[in-house]
Amino acid sequence: MKTNPCITVLMPAYNTEKYISEAIESVLQQTHTDFELIIVNDGSTDGTKAIINSYKDERIILIDQPNMGVAAALNTGLKYSKAPYIARFDADDVCHPQRLEKQIKFLLENPEYILVGSDADYILENNDFLFHFQCIAHSHQEIMEKLYFYCPFMHPTVMYKKANVANAGGYPTDAHNFEDYLLWTAIAKEGKFCNLAEPLIKYRLNSASVTIDERWRGKRFRELKRDAIKRGHITAEEGNELLAIIKSQDVRKIKEGSYHALCGKKFLANNYQPEKAREHVKKAISIWPLRLDNYLLYTVSYLPEKFILWLHKMSPNKL
């Protein structure tokens, strides 16, 4: 293995035995081969570690740590990374073969840019295609116009210069579930941002993931996040409150309900298949029958496609 690889692919992993083999294989099959793959096993209690150890590719580096959360796992990986460029990736997603090649080419040819993301193809837990996700902004100007209102990047698609993130102190460990978003605001003045207008990964919607539809998180969670983004930092006290909210919702009922509700929305607004949408919404209702928004979503699924698209465009929080 090269002492100084060009790229570190940084992958945190927690109880991902179901998907991590596919994720690792997609990295090993990249057309750009000058990389190391650092996998931070964040206290997994399933077969994740054994699967990682089954690979003999010298580019794979396994780091074990007790369960400390995504931000801490990423900071651990950054500490041990040897490359000047970091490609973020998740253990339940899939890289398209030219992902690294296209992003490193962009950054090397445009040195004023410090971070580049991309569009993505959303897939379901079973690998079925859900919809093609287009970033809310692609050019630097578009990104900066939206940065403090919406996160313009899908975290597992980004490649960035390590030095800029290191100068910012790494990922903020108190910004639970939006450590990446807060970090982007911290480095925004150090260089330019871009999203490539093509899908470079398959992003898996996964009911076991820590990421759920934020509407299910509740009003207080969204308030804490919004205030932290506006200020550019978050306090330890706010972090503890966020963590308490997340832990209270870390139950299968909420995660599965959120997963099916989100799939239903996407099968209406992004990939119009109302029958599949209703299948998922009915599952969400059966899991969490007191959420009235799911009944509204089920009713909307019988409306014409043009009206649904108009409603989605005019009132994005309703779908």
Image: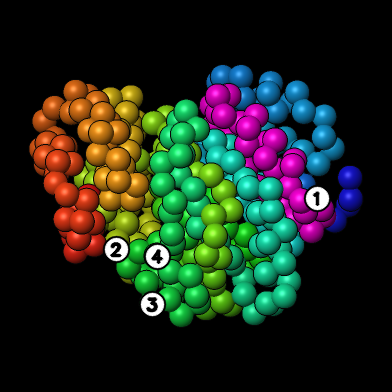
Please state which of the two labelled residues, at mark 3 or mark 2, is closer to the viewer: 3
Q: Residue at x 55, y 21 (%)?
A: 45
- The type of residue carrying mark 3 is Glu
Between the C-alphas of marks 4 and 2, the distance is: 21 Å
Magenta stretch bounds? 5-34
Between the C-alphas of marks 3 and 2, the distance is: 18 Å
Tell whether position 21 is magenta.
Answer: yes
Task: Name the image quarter holding the N terminus.
Answer: top right
Q: State the residue position of label 3.
A: 145
Judged from the image, the secondary structure of the residue bearing numbered disc 1 is: loop
Q: State the residue position of label 2.
A: 227
Q: Residue at x 43, y 54 (%)?
A: 133
Q: State the residue position of label 1.
A: 33
**Image vertical order of residue 107 relative to residue 312, above or below:** below
Q: State the residue position of label 4.
A: 136
Where is residue 72, by image quadrant?
top right
